[in-house]
Image: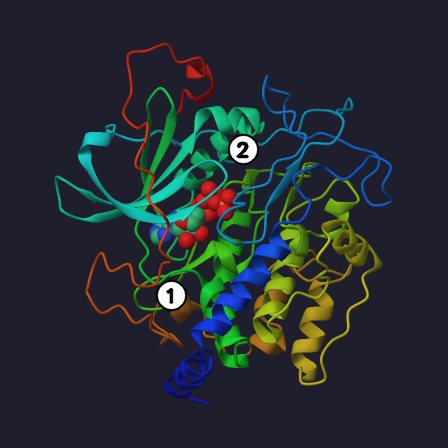
Amino acid sequence: MTSMEHSESVLQSLNDVSLDELARRQQERNIYAGMEVDKPPSQNSPSLSNGGKEESPGPNNNSEGASRDQSSGQRQQYSADPAPQSRPAVKSTKNANRDTTTKGKYKLNDFQILRTLGTGSFGRVHLTRSIHNGRFYAMKTLKKERVVTMKQVEHTNDERRMLKLAQHPFIIRMWGTFQDCNNLFMIMDYIEGGELFSLLRKSQRFPTPVAKFYAAEVFLAIEYLHGLDIIYRDLKPENILLDKNGHIKLTDFGFAKEVSDVTYTLCGTPDYIAPEVVATKPYNKSVDWWSFGILIFEMLTGYTPFYDPTPMKTYENILNGTINYPDYLPPDILDLLQKFIVKDLTQRLGNLQDGSDGIKYHPWFKEVIWERLLARDIETPYEPPITSGVGDTSQFDRYPEDKDLDYGISGVEDPYRDMFIDF
Ligand SMILES: Nc1ncnc2c1ncn2[C@@H]1O[C@H](COP(=O)(O)OP(=O)(O)OP(=O)(O)O)[C@@H](O)[C@H]1O
């Protein structure tokens, strides 16, 4: 199939889906996302006993559980540091000397806020325009109070630091951060094409070459992060944006963490969490390769293999590890998926002696020319229909705008000042 034919088949399936059908599926996703994951599973549950703790127990980081984005119809993220136990602190040193400060501070007045692109549990992402260079940027805002009450202070500081460290063609670029008394602000490139999630839901499932293209670009992003000792920990189609040409940009580093060895925090999105994370065992970068397998499965089938409306049942399914692979999946894909979605870490592709090369040279990826892909020199299977040029927002849902934004307040007492000193 040529690249053109891929695009046509994706577009064809898009055209086949009525708006009602889309609304119904979005609604389904809401129900599916709205289940009880805002509480950490009980310590007695078969899957989540025996807690551990990775991150230094800062004053506000003993997460009892936090879910993100309960309003936008996406699968919820989940983060919980189980009961603290005395474990040696994990040292992450690889990037210790890299400068993650931002040169020259932006301020709110540098941007004109245009509209909301997305919402999360901590705030909104706005389309903005620089008053200096006229360019469009996405401005992610997080309410400090919410970050603190949901015990995500360290994850939020990590998000800023990891985003600043990561500079890659398939990773969102963050230009700077700032804060006021109530909010944190992150200025990122605006990615016009919307979420891969929306495209996948509209298409139901992707033809193999389309799934392979996105998987290969995601692979390069994850391989790069692992090279920096960063575990991403939240791979899913909602966190993959498409630029105007149809290349991917990995976004939302809310759970990304620099870890050279192993870590313990339970976080991620239920359908995508690896069994060793569910079982609160120490885990390493290979959790991203498990999620990568789930992502490829979802792109090819339109659903996730351990799906259940109840997250606790999803966790059980993950621990059972039984997957019914549909008959239409050809043997090379089956082989790949079975090597990613495998509980035994000594069998999991990406975690073997040949590291990420084992993935790169797997037969399913044999026609991928990795150097050209990295150079964005491979034709994309789908170009988002961006008609009104830069700043086009047609690929994003409309969100009711908040008329009472409390942005830009300073000079009053800020109880959280010491918690976000890098912003
Ligand atoms: N740089 C960007 N360009 C365009 N849209 C973006 C950008 N960053 C985020 N968005 C939109 O805003 C949504 C929310 O962003 P993000 O996932 O980073 O926020 P969040 O608060 O972490 O949300 P969640 O709780 O769902 O994880 C994204 O799903 C996407 O639709």
Whether residue 191 sits left or right of residue 89 in the image: it is left
Colouring method of the image: rainbow
Locate the C terminus and report the quarter of the image it occupies. top left
Q: Which residue is mark 1?
A: 247
- As drawn, 241 above or below 400: below
- Residue at the location (51% across, 40% down)? 254
Question: Cβ of disc 1 within 8 Å of ligand 1?
Answer: no
Residue in the picture at 57% in, 29% down: 150
- Disc 1 marks which amino acid? His
Left or right of 133: which side holds 220? right
- Left or right side of 170 for 208: right
Q: CA distance from mark 2 to mark 1?
A: 27 Å
Q: Amino acid at mark 2?
A: His
Dot 2, crowdedness within 10 Å: few (<14), some or many (≥20)?
many
Residue 359 located left or right of residue 153: right
Image x and y of residue 275, in percent: 76, 51
Residue 317 image point, x, y percent: 79, 58
- Out of 391 and 227, give the one closest to the viewer: 391
Q: Estimate the x, y position of residue 374 in percent, counting from the top left.
A: 40, 64
Q: Is residue 254 visible?
A: yes
**Mark 2 secondary-structure assignment:** helix
Badge 1 crowding class, 10 Å Cα cut-off, few under 14, some 14 to 19, many 20 or more, is: many
The residue wearing badge 2 is: 155
Query: In terms of image quadrants, where is residue 353?
Result: bottom right
Vertically, is 59 above or below 368?
Answer: above
Badge 2 residue CB within 8 Å of ligand 1: no
Q: Nearer the viewer, residue 346 or 339?
A: 339
The spot of residue 292 in percent (x, y) is: 60, 60
- N-terminal of the pair, mark 2 or mark 1, is 2
